[in-house]
Amino acid sequence: MLELEDIQHFLISRPAALAARYEFLAFRRKGAGREWLKGILDKVGTAKALAAGNTGKRWVTVGFTWNGLRALGVNHDSLATFPQEFRQGMAARAEILGTTGANHPENWAGGLASDELHAIVILFARDVEERERCRQEHREYLLQQCDGVKVLSSLDLEATPPFTYAHEHFGYRDRLSQPVIEGMGEEPTPGSGPAIKAGEFFLGYPDEDGPPTRLPQPEVLARNGSYVAYLRIEEHVGAFRDFLRQQGDTPEQQEWVAAKLMGRWRSGAPLVLSPDQDDPGLGGDMQRTNDFNYGKMDPYGYGCPLGAHIRRMNPRDTAANMQRRKMIRRGGTYGPPLPEDKPDDGIERGIAAFVGCASLVRQFEFAMNVWANDPNFHELGNERDPFVGTQDGSFDLTIPKRPIRKKIKGLPAFTTIRGGAYFFLPGIKALRYLTSLS
Amino acid sequence: MATQASASAKETDWTKPAAMAIPKEGYFKLQNGRYGPLYPKSPACYGFTIIAKIKPGREEVIRGYGKTIEETIAGLPEALEVLKLHYLRWVLFDIGNDTYFMYQGIFDTDFDKYTEDAVSLFSKYGLNTVFENLEGFPEDWKTNAPAFVQFVREHQRPSFLEYGEYPYVSADEIKKALKLKAAFSNMLDLMQ
C-alpha cells in the first residue's frame, strides 16, 4: 500500500487548479535552503490530504536538483548514491536527450541550465486570484525570513478557454492516456493496459521488475520520493497554423494534416479508430478514446502514421517492455492564447510540463533519446517527433496513404525547448530529514 | 544535423558492397548515449564483439547453451525479435591455460538504445544464465541494467574494419524484400 501521507500529491492526484506558478530557487548561503524549507514544509501537499477532499485552494510541491540537495547539506557519500543522470543534471545530458540546436541548454532562459538551480516550488491554485495571493505570500516570506534564497526565475501558468477539457495552444485535447498506479483502487481506461506497479514512479516500492533496488541513501531520504523531468516548451502557434494552411486548401484537409502529426484529431479522437474524419464525441469519451492498439489494428500506419507524436510516445503493442516505460505527466499552459484570426504576436506561449518516474535514464531519457529524437525509430530514416523532437527543417513526416503515401519534407519546428531540469521530489519524512541536516 | 542527413543518403545505396575502416576507439566522433559512447552504423549495420574469460571448469555448461538456445528459438522463432539481430556467433577458445568466450552479434539497433529491453529479454527466456559463467559478470544483473551494460562495455572490443555486401540494409528490409518477391511470384502465377 502506498504511504499516501508521506508522498507529495504532485504525481498522484490532480487538484482542481486553473492557475499555477513555478519558482526556481538558488540557495546562496549555507543553511539558507534548510531554513526556507522549514518554514514552507507544512504547506507541502500530500496525496492523502488531497484525496481527503479537493476543497483546498492551493497545493504546494517542492523539488530539488542534485546541486540543491548538496546546498541543503546532504553529505558527499549520500550524494554519490543518486543516479548518474540526476547528478549530471538535464543540461549536461543535452546530447543524449537530443535537445540540440535551437533547443540546446545554451539557449535556455531563467537560470535553468545553471549549476545554481537548486530547487523548484510548484504552486497549483484554484484560480488566478489565489495564485497571486500565494505569490505575494511567498515573496514576503522570502524577503522577511529567507535572506540567502534567490528566485532565479518564475513562470505563471493559466488554463486557457475552453475550460471544460485540458488542451494546449495548438488546440489539441490532452490527458487522454495516463498510467494508473497499482494499489490505488483506480481502473485503467480500456486500451490503457494494466495498472503499473508503484515502484515505477515512487522509490521504495516494488516495480515491474521486482523489489526495490539501489535506492539512494539514506533510505529516509529516498523513500516515497520521485524524479521529475521539467520541460518548458514554447509553442510557435503562428508557424503551426501557417504550416497547416500550406498543407491543405480547406479546413478539412488542414485538420487531417494536424491529426496526422499528432495521431489524434484535435478533438482527441484517435486516428486508429477514426482514420478518415473527426469524431469529437469519441475524443472525450474516456471509455473509448484510448481503446486501440497499433500492431493489430494499424500495423502500416494508414490510420496513425508510424512517426506521429502519440505513436512515438506510447508505441503500445509494437514495443517491448512497455510496462517499464510509463511516465506520469503533469503541467499546464503558459502565455495568453493566440486568437485564430490573429498573426503571431511574438509573445511566448507554450506548455511547462513535468514527467514523473522512478528512473530518469530508463523512462524519461529513453523516451527522448529513442522515441522522440532517433531518426531511425521504426526505421523511418529521417524523422523525429513533430512536437517534442528537435526539428530543424531537415526532417520529414511520412503519412501512409493509398495508393501513394504523402511525405512532408522539411517539417518546421513547431516548438522550442526554452528550459529544463531534473528534480527530486522527496517524501514528507525526507523533507523533514533535509531540514534537520547541518 | 548534417551528419544525420548524409548518413541517410549513404544508407540508401545498398547496390554497392562497401567497407569501412573504424578508429581504435570504435567511433569517429564521440557521441554519448544513455549508458556510454555510441558506436556508429557501418556497412555491416551495428554490432558488438564481447570477449570474456570464463570461470574455470564452466566450458561444458557454456557449450550446453548452444542446444538450449537452438531449442528456445525452434519453439519460439520471434524470441529475439527485440534485439533486431542479423547474426549471432558464440565461440569458445583457449589462450594458454584460460578459456575465453566470444559473443559476436550483428544487429540493426545501436546497443545503447534497447539495453534494458535486451536485459529483460535474456531474463525472460533464460538466456541470462550463460553470462553468469563469465568472470566478473555482476551477480545482481537482473535488477541492475547499468551493471550489465558496464560489463558488456568493458568486455567489448570494437572492429577496425567492417564490410557489408548490401550495406546498411536492415533485417526487416531484407525480409520485406523477400516477402515482396514471393508475392510477385504468386501474382505472376495467377496471371497465367
Image (spheres, coloured by chain):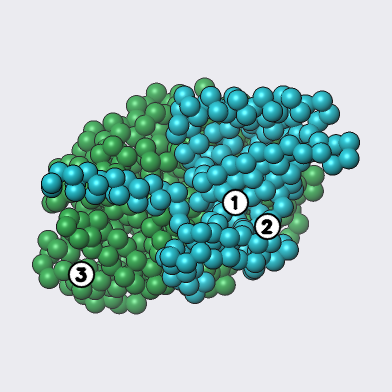
Which residue type does callout 2 highlight? Ser
Pick the front one: A288 or A170 = A288
Q: Name the residue under label 3.
A: A247
Which residue type does callout 1 highlight? Gly
Residue A59: image x %, image y %? Answer: 45, 44
Residue A333: image x %, image y %? Answer: 36, 58
Q: Mark 1 points at which residue?
A: B47
Picture residue at 48% right of the left edge, 40% below the top: B82
Pick the front one: A288 or B32 = B32
Subunit of label 2:
B
For the residues labelled 2 and 1, say whether their Cβ atoms are less than 8 Å apart: yes
Chain B drawing hue: cyan
Which residue type does callout 3 highlight? Gln
Q: Which residue lies furthest to the right in this view?
A: B97
Q: Is residue A383 above or below residue B101?
A: below
Structural distance between the alpha carbons of marks 2 and 1: 9 Å
Q: Residue furthest front?
A: B192
In the structure shown, which secondary structural element does the residue marked by tag 3 occupy?
helix
On the image, which quarter does residue B77 sit in? Answer: top left
Structural distance between the alpha carbons of marks 2 and 3: 46 Å
Structural distance between the alpha carbons of marks 3 and 1: 41 Å
Kindly report which numbered mark, 2 or 3, lies closer to the viewer in this rendering: 2
Q: Do the residues at discs 3 and 1 belong to one chain?
A: no
In the structure shown, which secondary structural element does the residue marked by tag 2 occupy?
loop
Picture residue at 76% right of the left edge, 57% below the top: A30
Q: Name the residue under label 2.
A: B159
Q: How crowded is mark 1: few (under 14 residues within 10 Å), some or many (20 or more)?
A: many
On the image, which quarter does residue A151 sit in? Answer: bottom right
| Mark 2 or mark 1: whose residue is earlier in sequence | 1
In the structure shown, which secondary structural element does the residue marked by tag 1 occupy?
strand
Q: Do the residues at discs 2 and 3 belong to one chain?
A: no
